[in-house]
């Protein structure tokens, strides 16, 4: 039986920090479902379809990762429901700093209360990518800064088009 992990997030936009988590997860799991959240309580720069396209281009065009091992989908349900849909009992979350831990710890606890069969696994991106956040990437590009070290070529193109 294939071991499937769900990696939920907004990916608005995807960064090298997210990509590090995906690459590390590929070493641990047979399949990664990248769930692009489309819950209405966030103010997204890109709509869900744009984010799906950006993630697909970053992973499969820019980085040429294995399409057989990664599925990119959008969802607007509970992550635990997404786990049930894809027959997974693993939620992946990335940690950058201690400040992320408290929120992620609470989220993992709530998911566990919703479905006691689900485990949350925390992966850290490489040290050079731990400071990267989608929020900072958007802010830097908006102010015409260089974001080459933070995300892929196609993602940079999408960001620049959005701010032109």
Image (cartoon, grey):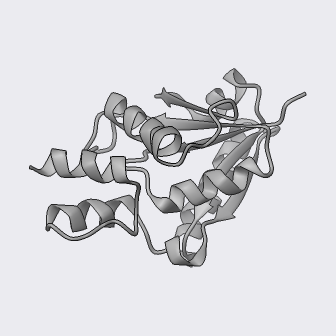
Residue farthest to the right, as pictured: 1
Q: Residue at x 38, y 40 (%)?
A: 54
123 sits left or right of 58 in the view: right
The picture quadrant where one finds residue 86 is: top right
Residue farthest to the top, as pictured: 85
Residue 66 on image: x %, y %:
65, 38
Residue 38 visible? The answer is: no
158 sits left or right of 70 in the view: left
Foreground residue among 22 and 90: 22
Foreground residue among 38 and 139: 139
Foreground residue among 144 and 34: 144
Q: Quarter of the image containing the N terminus?
A: top right
53 vs 43: above or below: above
Residue 25 on image: x %, y %:
71, 51
Residue 122 on image: x %, y %:
69, 60
The picture quadrant where one finds residue 53 is: top left
Q: How many marks are shown on the rendered structure?
A: 0
Q: Residue at x 55, y 54 (%)?
A: 19
Residue 143 visible? The answer is: yes
Q: Residue at x 40, y 65 (%)?
A: 150
Q: Residue at x 49, y 60 (%)?
A: 16
158 sits left or right of 75 in the view: left
């Amino acid at each position: 039986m294939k071991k499937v992990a769900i990696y939920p997030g907004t990916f608005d936009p995807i960064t090298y920090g997210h990509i590090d988590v995906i690459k590390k997860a590929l070493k641990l799991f047979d399949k990664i479902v990248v769930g692009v959240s489309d819950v209405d309580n966030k103010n997204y720069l890109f709509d869900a379809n744009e984010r799906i396209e950006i993630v697909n281009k970053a992973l499969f065009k820019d980085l040429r990762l294995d399409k057989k091992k990664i599925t990119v989908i959008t969802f607007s349900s509970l992550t635990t429901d997404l786990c049930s849909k894809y027959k997974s009992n693993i939620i992946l979350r990335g940690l950058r700093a201690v400040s992320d831990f408290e929120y992620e710890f609470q989220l993992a606890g709530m998911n566990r209360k919703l479905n006691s069969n689900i485990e949350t696994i925390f992966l850290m991106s490489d040290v050079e990518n731990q400071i990267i956040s989608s929020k900072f990437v958007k802010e830097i590009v908006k102010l015409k800064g260089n974001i080459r070290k933070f995300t892929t070529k196609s993602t940079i193109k999408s960001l620049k088009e959005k701010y032109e």
